[in-house]
């Protein structure tokens, strides 16, 4: 269960970084 949480967290951080790179003007 904790492994899934860690995996989901890393995936979420990865997508957040991709979104920031794609939309640098987006404050989120």
Image (cartoon, rainbow, N blue to C red):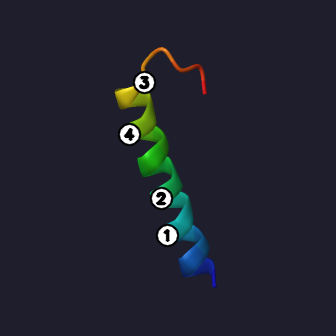
The reply to whether callout 2 and callout 1 are in contact (CB within 8 Å) is: yes
Image disc number at residue 7: 1
Q: Measured from the top left, where is residue 17 in percent x and y?
A: 42, 38
* Mark 1 Cα-neighbour bin, 10 Å: few <14, some 14–19, many ≥20: few
Which of the pair 22/4 is nearer the observer?
A: 22
Tell me the element at label 1: helix
Residue at point 48% right, 14% down? 25
Res. 18 mark: 4
Instruction: Work out how far the residue at label 2 is from the one at label 1, CA to CA, in angstroms.
Output: 5 Å
Q: Residues within 10 Å of mark 3 (few under 14, many from 20)?
A: few
Q: Secondary structure at mark 3?
A: loop
Q: Which residue is mark 2?
A: 10
Q: Which mark is residue 23?
A: 3
2 or 4: mark nearer the eye: 4
SS at circle 4: helix
Image quarter (top left, top right, bottom left or bottom right) of the N terminus: bottom right
Total numbered labels placed on residues in the image: 4
1 vs 21, left or right, is right
């Amino acid at each position: 269960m904790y492994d899934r949480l860690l995996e989901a967290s890393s995936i979420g951080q990865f997508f957040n970084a991709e979104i920031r790179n794609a939309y640098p003007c987006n404050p989120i």
